[in-house]
């Protein structure tokens, strides 16, 4: 657990910088993110998954599951899109938009923590 604590605290300054950028981006409209499929309310379910599952869950496995569920939710949100339609150029801006709007705290530390604890299978 000491290793995990060191990992989390080591990212404090990066997290502060990212949080500042996320706060600035959260003020921007959806159109700023150049989303292929703009959807005024459709992303709210994905944002809620990230907010609840990643932001409020204490178990790393639940946080990881929420990230997967949010990614799947992006496909469901874009009803006219198929998996092939949502390549990285379409998927990534939508995911960034949802992460920004979810207000996840300490994203750098979270990423490092999940990578450290994830099963490598």
Image: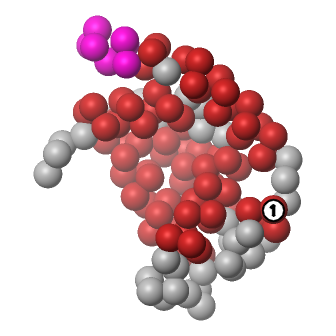
Residue furthest to the top: 2
**Above-or-below relation of 19 to 85:** above
**Image point (63%, 63%), residue name:** 93
Q: Quadrant of residue 43?
A: bottom right
**Above-or-below relation of 119 to 81:** above
Q: How many marks?
A: 1
* Residue 23 locus on image (x, y percent): 77, 37
* Residue 34 locus on image (x, y percent): 74, 69
**Image point (49%, 77%), residue name:** 87
Q: Quadrant of residue 42?
A: bottom right
Q: Which residue is mark 1?
A: 32
Residue 74 in view: no
Residue furthest to the bottom: 80
Q: Find out whether residue 70 is within the magenta segment.
A: no
> Magenta region's main secondary structure?
helix
Q: Give, as a single range, the part of the protein colored magenta.
A: 1-7
* Quarter of the N terminus within the rendering: top left
* Residue 88 locus on image (x, y percent): 50, 70
**Image point (32%, 18%), residue name:** 4
Q: Quadrant of residue 24?
A: top right
Q: Is residue 80 left or right of residue 6?
A: right
Residue 97 in view: yes
Tag 1's secondary structure? helix
Q: Is residue 19 left or right of residue 116?
A: right
Q: How many C-alpha atoms fall within 10 Å of the one at disc 1: few (<14), some, or many (≥20)? A: few
* Residue 116 locus on image (x, y percent): 27, 31
**Colour pattern of the rendering:** secondary structure
Q: Is residue 57 left or right of residue 61?
A: right
Closest to the observer, 97 or 79: 97
């Amino acid at each position: 657990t000491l290793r995990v604590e060191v990992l989390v605290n080591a990212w404090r300054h990066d997290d502060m910088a990212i949080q500042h950028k996320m706060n600035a981006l959260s003020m921007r409209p959806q159109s700023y993110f150049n989303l292929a499929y703009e959807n005024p309310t459709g992303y709210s379910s994905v944002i809620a998954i990230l907010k609840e599952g990643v932001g409020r869950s204490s178990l790393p496995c639940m946080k990881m599951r929420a990230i997967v569920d949010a990614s799947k939710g992006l496909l469901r949100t874009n009803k006219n899109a198929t998996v092939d339609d949502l390549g990285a150029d379409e998927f990534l801006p939508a995911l960034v938009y949802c992460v920004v709007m979810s207000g996840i705290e300490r994203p750098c530390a979270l990423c490092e923590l999940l990578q450290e604890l994830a099963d490598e299978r």
